[in-house]
C-alpha cells in the first residue's frame, strides 16, 4: 500500500479535485464513495474499485475492506489523517474512501414490474431518500430526468445509504417516452388529483412518477400517465416533502401486494 503525506502529491491533488468538483467527476466518469458501509455495499454488488484510500488511523480497522479491494486489483493508498479529513465530505470521517467508475444503468423493459421515475428533483437529500425507499420497497428500476440531481453525487450516496447498489439507476432518461411504452400502470403523484393513492390499484406492474419539489410533475408527463393520484392530508400542512410523498406511495404499493 502506498502512503501519501503531502498535499503536493499528484495523486492526492487528483483525488481532492475529484472529491470537490461535480464537473470533474462527470468529466472523468468517476464517483467518490465514502464510508465503510457504502464501500462494502459497492464491493458486495460486484463493482470494481479503481482506488481505495484509507486514513492512517483507520488502516488497522479497515483491513477487511483493504483485502477485498486488493483482490479486485484496486490501487491502495494510505493517507495521513489531515489529508484524508481535507477531502472528506463529512464532519467525522470514517477513514475509508473509494473511487469507482460511475455505474451506468441498463435499459428498462416496458414489462418491468415496479419502477420509480423522478422528474426534475433538485435536492440530493430527496433523491437519496427516494432511492433508499425504492430499494426497501423492492423497486427494480429508477429513472431520473436529465434535470434531476446527479444520483451518484456524494450527498445522494450518503442519503441513499447503499440503496444505489440494489437498483438499476438510469439517468438522463426520456420519461415521457418510457411512460408511453410502459405496459403497466403509470401513476402520477400530484396534489390536485381526485383519486387517493389508497384507492388506486397498485397490485400489477407499476411506474410511480414523482416531480419537482416545488412545481411537481410537468403537465406533459402528468397528462401522459394513466392514473393521477394524491396522498390525502387531513392535517394543516399544505404539502409533503417529495421524498416523503414518494416513499408513502411506494409502500402503499407494497401494502397492496401483501408486503411482497
Image: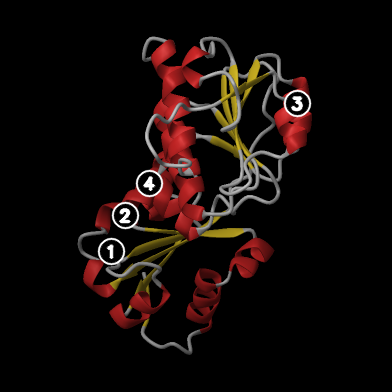
- The crowding category of the residue bearing disc 4, from other C-alpha atoms within 10 Å (few below 14, some 14 to 19, many at least 20), is some
Q: Which disc number belongs to residue 36?
A: 2
* Image quarter hosting the N terminus: bottom left
Camera-nearest label, 3 or 4? 3
Task: Determine contact: label 1, label 2, CB under 8 Å.
Answer: yes
Residue, disc 3: 224
Question: Which numbered disc flags the more N-terminal residue, 1 or 3?
Answer: 1
Residue, disc 4: 161
Numbered disc 4: secondary structure: loop
C-alpha separation, residue under disc 1 versus residue under disc 2 = 7 Å
C-alpha separation, residue under disc 2 versus residue under disc 4 = 11 Å
Camera-nearest label, 3 or 2? 3
Question: Which numbered disc flags the more N-terminal residue, 2 or 4?
Answer: 2
Front position in the image: 235 or 74: 235
Q: Residue at x 50, y 54 (%)?
A: 124
Residue, disc 1: 94
Quarter occupied by residue 86: bottom left
Task: Determine contact: label 2, label 4, CB under 8 Å.
Answer: no
Q: Is residue 231 left or right of residue 188?
A: left
Amino acid at each position: 500500500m502506498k502512503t501519501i503525506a503531502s498535499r503536493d502529491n499528484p495523486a492526492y491533488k487528483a483525488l481532492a479535485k475529484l472529491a470537490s468538483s461535480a464537473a470533474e467527476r462527470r468529466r472523468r466518469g468517476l464517483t467518490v464513495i465514502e464510508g465503510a458501509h457504502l464501500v462494502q455495499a459497492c464491493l458486495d454488488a460486484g463493482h470494481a474499485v479503481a482506488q481505495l484510500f484509507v486514513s492512517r488511523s483507520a488502516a488497522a480497522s479497515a483491513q477487511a475492506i483493504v483485502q477485498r479491494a486488493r483482490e479486485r486489483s484496486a490501487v491502495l493508498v494510505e493517507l495521513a489523517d489531515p489529508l484524508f479529513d481535507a477531502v472528506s465530505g463529512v464532519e467525522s470521517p470514517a477513514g475509508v474512501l473509494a473511487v469507482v467508475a460511475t455505474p451506468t444503468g441498463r435499459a428498462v423493459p416496458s414489462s418491468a414490474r415496479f419502477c420509480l421515475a423522478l422528474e426534475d428533483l433538485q435536492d440530493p437529500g430527496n433523491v437519496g431518500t427516494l432511492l433508499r425507499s425504492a430499494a426497501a420497497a423492492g423497486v427494480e428500476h429508477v429513472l431520473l430526468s436529465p434535470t434531476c440531481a446527479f444520483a451518484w453525487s456524494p450527498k445522494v450516496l450518503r442519503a441513499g445509504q447503499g440503496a444505489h447498489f440494489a437498483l438499476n439507476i438510469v439517468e438522463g432518461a426520456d420519461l415521457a417516452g418510457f411512460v408511453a411504452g410502459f405496459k403497466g400502470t403509470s401513476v402520477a403523484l400530484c396534489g390536485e388529483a381526485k383519486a387517493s393513492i389508497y384507492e388506486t390499484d397498485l397490485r400489477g406492474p407499476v411506474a410511480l412518477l414523482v416531480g419537482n419539489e416545488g412545481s411537481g410533475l410537468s403537465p406533459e408527463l402528468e397528462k401522459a400517465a394513466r392514473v393521477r393520484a394524491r396522498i390525502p392530508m387531513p392535517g394543516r400542512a399544505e404539502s409533503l416533502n417529495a421524498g416523503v410523498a414518494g416513499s408513502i406511495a411506494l409502500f402503499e404499493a407494497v401494502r397492496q401486494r401483501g408486503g411482497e
